[in-house]
Image (cartoon, rainbow, N blue to C red):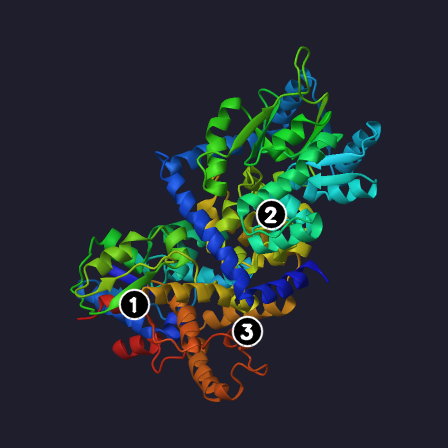
Amino acid sequence: MNSAAQFRDDAKRLTHDLRHRELIQSALKKYEVARDAKKARYQDWESARVEASDIKWDAVNHLDAHLAEFARNAEAHGTKVHWASTGGQAREIILGIVREKNARSIIKSKVMTGEEIHLNEALEKADMSVVESDLGEYIVQLRHEAPYHFVFPAMHLTRGEISDLFERELGSAPTNDAGELTMIARRALRKKYITADIGISGANFAIAETGMVSITENEGNARLTCALPKVHIALMGIEKLLPKLEDLALFLPMLATAGAGQVLTGYNTMYGGPRQPGEADGPEEFHVVLLDNHRTRLLADAEQRDALQCIRCGACLNVCPIYKNVGGHTYGTTYQGPIGAVITPHLRGLQDWKHLSFASSLCGACTSACPVKIDLHHHLLQSRRNARGQKPLWWEKIAFKLFAVLANSPALWALAKPMARFGQIFHPLVKATRLDPAYVWTQSRELPKVAPQTFKEYWKGRNP
Amino acid sequence: MRVTLFIPCFVDMCFPRAGIAMVEILERLGHTVECPEEIACCGQPAFNSGYWPETRAVALPILQRLRNAEVVVIASGSCGAMVKNFYPELFKETEHAQAACDLASKTFEFSDFLVTKLGVTDLGARFPHKVTFHDGCHGLRELGIKKQPRTLLAHVRELELVEMTEAESCCGFGGTFSAKFPMISTAMGEVKCASARETGAEFIVSNDASCNMHIQGLLDRQGQPLKTIHLAEVLNTR
């Protein structure tokens, strides 16, 4: 099945699943309350957004220089920097390190770029044991499914479902207590950190000025993943760059507030290189893999380039009425929601993913929520234009051409009303059946009635 | 002032009372109103579907017809956003770019025109009902209209406004979206209707008749007594 048909089918099924809708909407309602409370602690949230957007805009527009500076500074501290143009290249680089180290087991903290390049599959194919250490990621890994939300991977599951899963997979006793569920996962995971040969993480930000990678997390799992194994690999998209260390003073709180309704995320750690001479701990090797994977294609699009400002906070998903009703898996993408609908056509092809631009009421809630002011919903409009410009639907093109003729001719327009009224007489015979020409509307809604006197008739009557 | 009233297609056909209320209000305030017969639709359906050349075929005669208008008042936030924000985008880098920007700068959504341009807040209306207000997305987020309709409602006698928690959430209409993805559109509308019902209001008031059309369509199918009404009709009561 192609991606558009899959989206449509899943959307249809999930919009009819009232339990699912209620679960997601009540979870996101709690997020909204927490986010608003934390936003209120800013002197001026809007100014913070403008500042963050400006910094990222500059970073994106001088990405070449910032990347070179980052690589230079990282290498100066013994970090090995790798450049990957494609997902395939990134997988080869990581598999190369894995083979060189004769690694058998790998622990991962949350890394969405890993999902993007299907890293787990590649590692498992090479006979590696791979374990996700982020609780949500661990849960969806046990369920053999993709993350439901790129910040909250398991938000679609209830405690009961997680308890059942742990009982089945880990042999634990059933419980409905969130703390106990966390402890079950923790006990299983602690052993893995100690035995893992390699830790793989993502990155929230990369600082050009210092060559450091900044990782934000709430569970402490990333620290263990990055510190205990002998080798740490950080896989990140090239858009994660920030020019200066001081920029984090703005971005760390904004990421926490917009993403999870927190003042600051539990742990914010900067990784500046492997164990230095005289240091007692830390990995012996630190590799950073910089991934393009068509991000430069987006960079070349002057209209939509600001989408590379994204800090992956997920705020746009959390407020999106589409996301709230169809859920994360429906998108079939690594990055769900509005940002996914904007960037996936660039990363994976416009014609295959254009349906995500059309699956929007263009309400703009995403754009208002975005902490770095990405013009999300207008980019959806531009993608629609680009997609139809390349490949119009012949019948739509004809329909809109005819509509232009109709709209531009008062005489024809005046005819539309009697025709609509005539149609309305017979409409009840077929209403809400498959024979109904307006079925897409009338299957769930009543059609408005044409007024006995249109406005134009009223106006003509007044000014004969 | 000579006010050119832009009546969108669906207001003309299905909700003429909203347009008539605007004419009466503007005339009562002493303005001269004209409604160009040639104008039927702003072209948004084609625009949002990705057919920009076909949209320009609808929009260009409008640009020319409204070139000499003193001020244009448009009876829907959504069509207002089309003319104010998207016409300049549509005609960018064409010979009509300046005309599109000129039209944008003199075009106002109805409630914005009353409050911001005219400074009018009390129209002497009386509407003895409990109501809740729905912010149309285009009016709210494209044009930044939030306070204007509430200011106007605050001066309506015997009207009680109860805000719903989902006031700013999309009603799910989205033009062609409602036909392309009816299941998502309907689910969104159901959230809206449930939130409005929670307030115990008798009417959902909005400054966008297109949202009202969608919400009313759902309410009628659900057999709910709740009614939608355009802001202009409320303001025109006595």
Q: Position of residue A266 (x, y in %)?
A: 51, 33
Q: Chain of mark 3?
A: A
Q: Secondary structure at mark 2?
A: loop
For label 1, count other residues whose C-alpha is less than 10 Å away and answer few (under 14), some (14-19) or many (20+): many
Q: Amino acid at mark 3?
A: Val
User: Residue at image x 42%, y 80%?
Assistant: A417
Return the residue at label 1. Answer: B201
- How far across and how far down the image is residue A16, in percent? 55, 68
Instruction: For marks 1 and 3, give the one nearer the viewer.
Output: 1
Disc 2 marks a residue whose amino acid type is Pro
Q: Nearer the viewer, mark 2 or mark 3?
A: 2
Residue type at numbered disc 1: Ala
Provide the residue designation for mark 2.
Answer: A153
Viewer-proximal residue among A89 and A124: A124
Quadrant location, the C terminus of chain B: bottom left
| A200 up-or-down from A120: above or below | above
Q: In this orientation, does residue B198 appear?
A: yes
Picture quarter containing residue B49? bottom right
User: Considering the numbered disc 1 on the image, is that residue within a helix, a strand or a loop?
Assistant: loop
Residue A460 % position (x, y): 31, 77
Horizontally, is B136 left or right of A22 in the view?
left
Rendered view: A419 above or below B200 = below
- Give the CA separation, mark 1 to mark 2: 38 Å
